[in-house]
Image: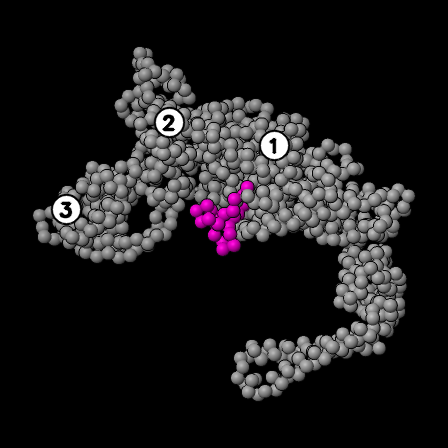
Amino acid sequence: MSTSQKYDSQKVEDKWYNYWMEQGYFHSEVDDRTPYTIVIPPPNVTGVLHMGHMLNNTIQDVLIRRARLKGFNACWVPGTDHASIATEAKVVAKLKEEGINKNDLSREEFLEHAWDWTHKHGGIILEQLKKLGASCDWERTKFTMDENMSASVIKVFVDLYEKGLIYRGYRMVNWDPEAKTTLSDEEVIYQEKQGNLYYLTYKIENSEETVTIATTRPETILGDTAICINPNDDRFSHLKGKKAIVPLANRAIPIIEDDYVDVEFGTGCLKVTPAHDINDKEIGERHNLEVIDIFNDDATLNEFGLHYQGKDRFEARKEIVKELESLGVLIKTETHINKVGTSERTGAVIEPKLSDQWFLKMKELAQPALDAVLNKEVNLVPDKFVNTYRHWMENVRDWNISRQLWWGQQIPAYYYGNGKNDFVIAETLEEALEKAKVQTNNAELKLLDIKQDSDALDTWFSSWLWPMSVFNGILEPDNPEINYYYPTNDLVTAPEILFFWVARMMIAGYEYRGEKPFINVYLTGIVRDKQRRKMSKSLGNSPDPIKLINEYGADGVRVGMLLSSPAGNDLMFEIDLCKQGSGFINKIWNSFKLLKSWEIDSAIEQPKSSAIAIEWYKAKFQQTLLEIEDHFSKYRMSDALMSTYKLIWDDYCSWFLEMVKPNFGEAIDEKTYKEVIAILEDNLKILHPFVPFISEEIWQQLDTRTKEEALIISKWPEALTVDTTIISEFAFASEVISGIRNIRKSKNISFKDQISLQILNNENTSTTFNEVITKLGNVSNLEYVDQQVEGSLSYRVKSNEYFIPIEGAIDVEAEKGKIQEELKYTEGFLKSVQNKLSNERFVGNAPEAVVAVEKAKQADAEAKIQMLKASLAGLE
């Protein structure tokens, strides 16, 4: 690309990404260098890029590119997650559109459709990440349903079962009626919702007496198997041993006593529905109550739902309420706020359901992973999440790992009989048969005699092995890759999966390698809009990341994402940030075009102004480099970018290039030009992690480039001792130059016209930057004086005074006229304000704040008049 052209981000980005891929720069193999490893949080295989992915993967790419430049053997492993619930739901919906019911298919037939769907949609998000510039080792791409990844999951299940840590239990679980599967406690989101509290009367058997109970779910009365009272409640002691009649169902149920009932709460009577409430289930077990489940798997009512059978639970509720009201059973209704559990995946309201499920004992397993964070063996960034993590881990519950799905790793339990405990656990069907023969003492058993559990494992039970399984560390625990790349260095992920995934990976790491899976966990914030709403497709407030990249370039979008993304704090994203990022890219490009436009003359001696400018910028660069390194060490990505941004925009573009730029029509000396190129190379190196494409494009166009073939594999700048003296001297000199420019602008003195500058050096400042002041101020004569210079324009920097003689610099008469005109206007303005303030009626009636504003106007006008008169006196 010629530097005369406008920067075309799409052409540049496609060109260099393809080049990096062709050269194999992203690929890593075991060698003698120190590894730096990141494993990607695997996005759902059927997903598409959203703003959260953009932020997360930009940060990962910044870290991996910087590590590559610092000489580490950088390895970023990409991949996708099979996402059991989400993917199966999409496949079922697709089949439905085609007129196919999942229940009419065999498991094998359904899985064929699921794999077809996966192959068709599975690569989309990874291809989109390439557009962002993600420098993943694509040769290592993994999928959680890959053969060896699945084999790892099954091996771990068998191992944990044999250790007595996995068991099958009949428990109250969270049921998602839309996905038709159980969920772990962590996959349930509780939301406060307004509902109703219904007060119902139950008749006492063989009596005219009734008792009143309150319920938020009147449809569940059809599953009632007892009424419970507190044994110490005298109001109801006479009912002990009697029976109540369930409305609608007309079943007689026992009245029991249990301390669980709070005498002070509600009516003091509690309906007990063991199939549909965890606390009711425990009461039911204590009192040996019947269990009646009134729901089908899709939360429609079953045969116990009477004439409401087949109706959705919420529709049935409305109709049941009307019927109870017509029967005189419903005596009152109150509004009621309660917490409703919803599925994290589908949003459906969760049903408590009794079910046989597989569980993993967590308490003992979790301790090493808890200790690792508390002892700072694994660092959570920011550390505000440590307390959240500790709370979760100290109160960890057994993990429900089975799902009523077909897409996923099938649970390796094989049943050989009709009893619940007639099963064996094995990695393969053949192994299961041999174990079953031993267990049954029946050598005649055949493969057809055993049947595998139809459930699949929770997706997280696959991804909790990710840092190990991507290097085949479960199947081959001593292979060279797992020994080299594990533990990984940095994990970048979202706080909402701190327990789902991060904690579980730590648990698995300590269980299977006796070691942490990563050293640092960088927890990003949530991407929100300026109204602080989480960005989502449903709200319509989330821009399409690919459209953003097409409009502003990947580099521009990366800068936009990182300009405001402090660790663990939410990012208030707006498109203007991408515009700012794109503006930064154009600034970098235009500064390079300026540099390339200069002619070089080897015969010219280096000006002193250029020599001192180079010395200053190198010091400033080193100072900024230390800042950047400090920010990176603390995972302050936004701050690291801002330090780089300011260095390039302010110090390099706005000051340094102006200092070394040859005069119009003149050439630059060769020594300065070479040093400017060397400085640019260092700039490009620290820019590269943030803006890889523009930096590589410029690097490849440098005539005197360093030996490395490409910027991506060049060497990070070396940190040297910082000369702070020259930095502070320039800070002062820049104010002097700004003062000259301000006077030129305010007095309409052309920047092409030379001026003289006299200095009253009260600060005893050095003369280091005098040549730079002379050049950037277009000063013909710079001299030091002992007293104020009359007939001059002046300004101050600290206690130093700077004088620009009027003669020859400005048209004195024209300037006098301008000042006199302004003075006349200001005096008139002052008079009008004074008139208002001298009006007692105004001062007495106007609000105090309004009077204060007028007084401030008076003071400002008086000060301005004094200044204008002083300026006139200086022109006499």
* Residue 440, quarter of picture: top left
What is the CA distance from the residue labelled 1 to the residue labelled 2? 36 Å
What residue is rendered at 37% in x and 23% in y? 108
Specify whether residue 829 is in view: yes
Residue linked to disc 3 = 245
Q: Which mark is residue 75?
A: 1
Query: Which class describes the residues within 10 Å of circle 3: few (<14), some (14-19), or many (20+)?
Result: many
What is the CA distance from the residue labelled 2 to the residue labelled 3? 46 Å
Residue linked to disc 2 = 110
Q: Secondary structure at mark 3?
A: strand
Q: Residue 755 in the image: x percent, y percent?
A: 85, 63
* Residue closest to the eye, 420 or 262: 420
Depicted 849 relative to depicted 87: above or below: below
* Residue closest to the eye, 619 or 99: 99
Which numbered disc, 1 or 3, marks the residue that appears first in the sequence?
1
What is the CA distance from the residue labelled 1 to the residue labelled 3? 68 Å
Q: Amino acid at mark 1?
A: Cys
Q: Nearer the viewer, mark 2 or mark 3?
A: 2
Q: Which residue is most to the top?
A: 444
What residue is rendered at 59% in x and 31% in y? 137
Residue interval drawn in magenta: 524-546
Query: Which class describes the residues within 10 Å of circle 2: few (<14), some (14-19), or many (20+)?
Result: many
Q: Residue 76 in the image: x percent, y percent?
A: 59, 33
Q: Do labels 2 and 3 touch, CB within 8 Å?
A: no
